[in-house]
Image (spheres, grey):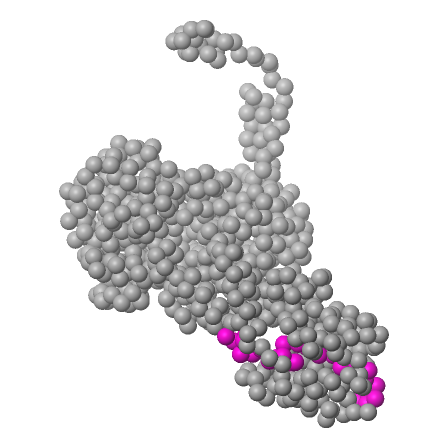
Amino acid sequence: MEDDIKEMYTKAKKAFEEYQYWPQAKVDEVVQAVGWMWQKEEVRKVLARTAVDESGIGVYEDKLAKIKTKTMGTLWDQRGIKTCGLIEEDKVRGIRKYAKPIGVIADVVPCTNPESTICCIGLSTLKTRNAMIVSPHPRTQKSSYLTVEYGREALQKIGAPVDLLQCIKNTSQAKTQELMAHCDFAVATGGAALVKVVYAAGKPAQTVSAGNVVSFVDETVPDLQATARKIMLSKIANNAASCSSENAVALHESIYDKMIECLKKEGGYLCSTAERETLRQCMWPDGKTLNRDIVAHNATFIAELAGLKVPATTKFLMVIGEKIGREDRFSGEKISPVLTVWKWSDFDEMLDRLEKILQFSGKGHSVSIHTELDERRVKLALRAKVGRVVCNMGHTAANSGGWGAGLPFTDTLGGGTWAGNMTSENVNWRHFLNYTLVSMPIPEHIPSDEELFGDYLKKWERD
Amino acid sequence: MGTGLIKAVIFDFGQTLVDSADGCRQAEKEAQAKLFGHMALSLREKFLDRYRQIRKAFHDRSEFSRPAMWREVYHDHCLVPDDALLEAWEAQYWDTVKAHSVLFPEALGVLKALTTRFQLALITNTQGQPASGTHRLREFPRIETYFRVVVVAGENGIPPKPDPAPFKRCLRSLGIDAAQAVYVGDDWRNDVCGSRGAGLHPVWIQHAGVKRTWPEVKTDVPVITRLDELFGLRLLQA
């Protein structure tokens, strides 16, 4: 029977039971085999085309590039990493640390990245000797299924158990729920609807937060045009389908006018007050729900849908930020090439505003800053309740991994407890392991009061 | 075909004995409008395409719960539905269907005539109503009395048609073999294929007055366009 979830789990478990004892060298060969398959141009072309055709969202060329970057980046982050058997030994503490797999992992995949999400999580679960069953989004189930099929082909080529990778063919919410009930662990990169399903299953799970990246630009930036270009390229990548896409810029008042002009030169169209209202009515027809018909579509399509006349060369739409919260939805995540513009003169005051913005939308995710002042970067990092602060780079080019940034490659960005997630990190191989610690006797040492409380006692005494 | 061997005529309910096509169509339109409005979309045709695809997938799986189907539509659009709202819409949906449902004009006469010669029974899939035992049959007490056995498939642990289980359960209750029963229904998959799979003699009713696109299939199953055409079938002649 097609998509018999119980049977899929049984097959995955059987594959896992064989694979869980494979040595590092063989495991590394497995990830190389699957990674090599997914980065092939002919494979990426099929996956990107299928994803764009079936979902009607995103940009083919961007997906083509993204699948390659994410696949190779995930492999790059894994190179030389020990994930099998003894991985650490602390002779002083008498501790040996053994890495163990989890079992069968359910991977709930979004329609915005139905292929590259599987590449990142798939390579991570294989590196950690787990099996994975993908629950695709109904809009993009063909591209997700194909991605897994290519992975299975690569597994077969080298004699690895093919059922380490499986995908539900005709998905439904009920099947996703059933999958959750069977699997040992879940990772969900979907939006609120899917995350709700995952948590309802009561299984340990890695989930993600919604993005709402605010990108600060201050008066110390030496080349505003170059910064505007970085922001534009990042903003329009895959029609802003990424949760890492800039949703707002916060411009210092001294460079505000000049930066707006720079953004316009890069294809930004600044809406008038009347046009802003027209756009708002299109983007939130009921005043609260983001119109799914504009998500990850290009700027001219959205403008036309809204009834705005914009130049054909428009790459992104800009609106002036007014209020924060439900009363002005432009202050939240838009998942489209629409950029809200804030102006600030006092950095601390803008940080206060940022806190409110993130409280409304995007808490836990990430922020961006373009500045030459490191103290501002540090201050932003200390103040903002986010997992990542990306500095002087296009946000999507760095936040979930990039060749010019050190953040781990992933499509699954944790937002920490701020967002109700288990981790605030970029989810990769690290998050799919159990550890067994072997403890040997060491010379006993019971610390003295002096060792534990020395500084305190000197200052506050014993009373 | 074994004339004289037939002991029972078993009917499907919706679109076989009761014409609720207009009601279902109206209820569907109202539901689609509610979902479209609540989901805050702009592109109606695009939405309807997806809605119809999901509805067909549910029908193909013999899943009839409207809230479950609507939940899937929300899920498809990455939205979380309000369950209380879906329940309210479901109640309104069935109110609309009920308000527009009538017995086919010849139904009572046909049942009355057949009951003198055959045992009559009814096997209907649950329409996904929120509580079991609330099937729309209860709203037509005049026909309910003709049936010795009524099986509502899809609730109380009975799988929905086309699964053979509801057919077998009905035959057991009637105390006859499958070959001794004619089954009359409008749905190709659930009724015609389902009853044939269970060994009964299917009759496919395609009511002439009902606006509907019938599946294009080649079949040797008798096709009728009115219930009283049953009397002309060799199968049911003495």
Q: Is residue B108 magenta?
A: no
Quadrant of the snapshot with the C terminus of chain A: top left
Q: Is residue A234 visible?
A: no
Residue nearest the observer in this picture, A321 or A191? A321
Provide residue A200's location: percent of width, then percent of height.
Answer: 56, 48
The residues colored magenta run: B1-26
Q: Residue furthest front?
A: B142
A298 vs A438, left or right, is left
Q: Is residue B20 magenta?
A: yes
Provide residue A23's location: percent of width, then percent of height.
Answer: 61, 42
Residue nearest the observer in this picture, A317 or B163? B163
The quarter of the picture where residue A359 lies is top left
A115 vs A60, left or right, is right
Quadrant of the snapshot with the N terminus of chain A: bottom right
Vertical placement of residue B174 versus A155, above or below: below
Q: Is residue B147 visible?
A: yes
